[in-house]
Image (cartoon, coloured by chain):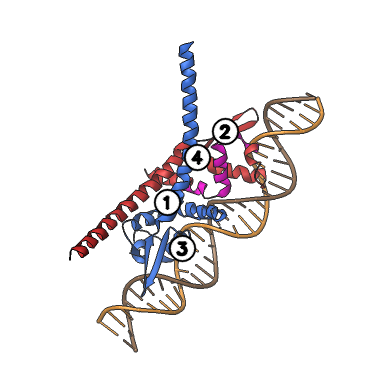
Chain colours: A blue, B red, C orange, D brown
Amino acid sequence: MANQQTALDTVFHALADPTRRAVIGRLLQGAAPVTRLAEPFTMGLPAFLKHLAVLETSGLIRSEKRGRVRTCRIDADRLAAAEGWLAEQRAIWQGRTDRLAAFVESQNSQEKAS
Amino acid sequence: MANQQTALDTVFHALADPTRRAVIGRLLQGAAPVTRLAEPFTMGLPAFLKHLAVLETSGLIRSEKRGRVRTCRIDADRLAAAEGWLAEQRAIWQGRTDRLAAFVESQNSQEKAS
DNA sequence: TCTATGGTTCACCATATGGCGAACCAACAA
DNA sequence: TTGTTGGTTCGCCATATGGTGAACCATAGA
């Protein structure tokens, strides 16, 4: 629970970067080794590995090394967790504005009735 | 479009902090002035104002000054945008695993049939 | 007008982040 | 065994982030 918050910290931080979001997008099409993932980007390998590290410590991706090639894949649970938090917040907001809308409507009805 | 990406950057970055998420949670219950928002936290006003600035430049909240009190409120559009991106990604993932599940199932059927 | 309140700005600090190049290790291929 | 390829680690750098205290401004109230 208290840990959940730190998890959201790291997940949202991981998502707050276009490179890392692009990696996620790529991995949604299937697992891939590090150098293939790095191809589209101009930065050097060391910099790219840092991005992967951020993604992995956030739990958004996992990776496994076989021989000399490390293969990365998505772990969608954390993605769902982040989406869940947002959905929850929006639900509260939605409920509020729905009640507000209902209130405004009831006021309108009263006005018409008067 | 190209700007959309920067928007996601700032929104996710804004969400990657427990203080700022707490502020959002508070604001979901209704608009509030700065000092009231700052009450629950131990940090000084200047630090807290920086958090508000991050939230506001991300577009997650808006604020308006009347007299000497600045009132903050939620702007749910950006929240929805972030949720939308996540939902989109998860849909792709879901589609993939659904197809995978279908494939596994079809393999199972074949195995049973053999 | 004086004072307390709500907010703002400024200068400063420690740490985190995101990038680099260079050197290095390990495994597959010739 | 000797390259070559795929990753990794290291030291370094510039900038961003998140916090501080102190001074300051502006308005509401006595």
Under mark 4, the amino acid is Leu
- The mark lying in front, picked from 4 and 1, is 1
- The mark lying in front, picked from 3 and 2, is 2
The stretch of residues the image draws in magenta is B12-35
**Numbered disc 4: what chain?**
B
- The mark lying in front, picked from 2 and 1, is 1
Query: Which residue is at 46% across, 39% downward?
Result: A91
Q: Is residue A80 magenta?
A: no
What numbered label is drawn on residue A80?
1
Is D12 situated above or below B19? below
Discs 2, 4: same chain: yes
Give the mark nearer the N terminus: 1 vs 3.
3
Give the mark nearer the N terminus: 2 vs 4.
2
**Numbered disc 3: what chain?**
A
User: Disc 2 versus disc 4: distance between alpha carbons?
Assistant: 13 Å
Locate the N terminus of chain B by quadrant: top left
List the residue tagged with mark 3. Answer: A53
List the residue tagged with mark 2. Answer: B31
- The mark lying in front, picked from 1 and 3, is 1
What numbered label is drawn on residue B60?
4
Discs 1, 3: same chain: yes
Discs 4, 1: same chain: no
What SS does tag 3 mark? Answer: helix
Discs 2, 1: same chain: no
What SS does tag 1 mark? Answer: helix
**Displayed quadrant of residue B2:** top left
